[in-house]
Amino acid sequence: MATPAHVAIIMDGNGRWAKARGLPRLAGHRAGVEALRKTVRAAPELGISYLTVYAFSSENWSRPKSEVSDLMGLLKLFIRRDLAELHQNGVRVRVIGDREGLQPDIRGLLQEAESLTAGNEALTLVIAFNYGGRDEIVRTARKLADAVARGEMASDAITMESFAGSLDTDGIPDPDLVIRTSGELRLSNFLLWQAAYSELVFLPCYWPDFSREHLADALRDFAGRERRFGGLAARDIAL
């Protein structure tokens, strides 16, 4: 079975999962963190080399302050509680998104996670935090424009390749497969440049209910589709 080297997931539906059970939204986010743990453990077993998760979008700041505070707390808890296990299991952590304006303790934790795990090779876990696809493209355009203005590069040196190499995801292959849970059928500003040729799978389950079996089913769906564009090496995996 052809396995996607890079799977990206929009982890949607925590709040609705909690509401359906008469629970506070925080309970849904906590259950979502547990689903993330299970998915990170399953990914290398299923032959995935890169796993990108949409942890906190740049639009999420508009949520109620109490919910944003809860999400920040869960991020801190996840890194402090899980970083040692991730490192032990050979997981490399990369963080994409705008870090300007983040609280110093959050920036420090993100940097610690990247630094500690930089040499690991079993799986690259890419955490999209304070991330928005349009924001990433604008930040990249500004960076290249500044380089041209300083005389460090010519404007005609800005190509698709040089632009891609200046994105947050420099060095990370584009996702072969993007999965979204909760039944919503949109990308919601996630990896807009990188997902230009990605296969898309939309699942009706809420993120806290996402399991290894859901991931395996999505990989089977991916493998069964006709690949019209090249660049993916076929590998056999046991699901």
Image (cartoon, rainbow, N blue to C red):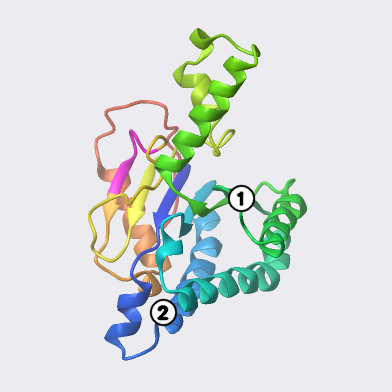
* SS majority, magenta: loop
Asked whether residue 155 is drawn in magenta, I would say no
119 vs 3, nearest the viewer = 119
In percent of width and height, residue 159 lies at 47, 16
> At x 65% / y 16%, what residue is drawn?
150
Query: Can residue 35 be seen by looking at this rendering?
Result: yes
- Toward which corner of the image does residue 4 lie, by quadrant? top left
Give the mark nearest the N terminus, 1 or 2: 2
The quadrant where residue 182 appears: bottom left
Q: Position of residue 167 (x, y in %)?
A: 53, 34
Q: Residue at x 51, y 54 (%)?
A: 130
Residue wearing tag 2? 28
Give amino acid for label 2. Gly
Q: Place residue 153 in its image quadrant.
A: top right
* Image quarter of the N terminus: top left
Q: Is residue 92 above or below residue 74?
A: above
Q: Is residue 10 left or right of residue 169?
A: left
Q: Position of residue 194 (x, y in %)?
A: 42, 36
Q: Is residue 167 left or right of residue 205?
A: right
Q: Marks 1/2: CA distance?
A: 26 Å
The image position of residue 20, as x and y in percent, is 27, 85
Q: Residue furthest bottom?
A: 22
How packed mark 2 is, by other alpha carbons closer than 10 Å (few <14, some 14-19, many 20 or more), is many
State yes or no: residue 199 in magenta. Answer: yes
**Amino acid type, callout 1:** Arg
Quarter of the image with the C terminus is bottom left
Would you name the residue on which mark 1 appears?
99
Relative to 176, is 19 above or below?
below
* Residue furthest front in the image: 149
* Magenta segment boundaries in residue numbering: 195-200
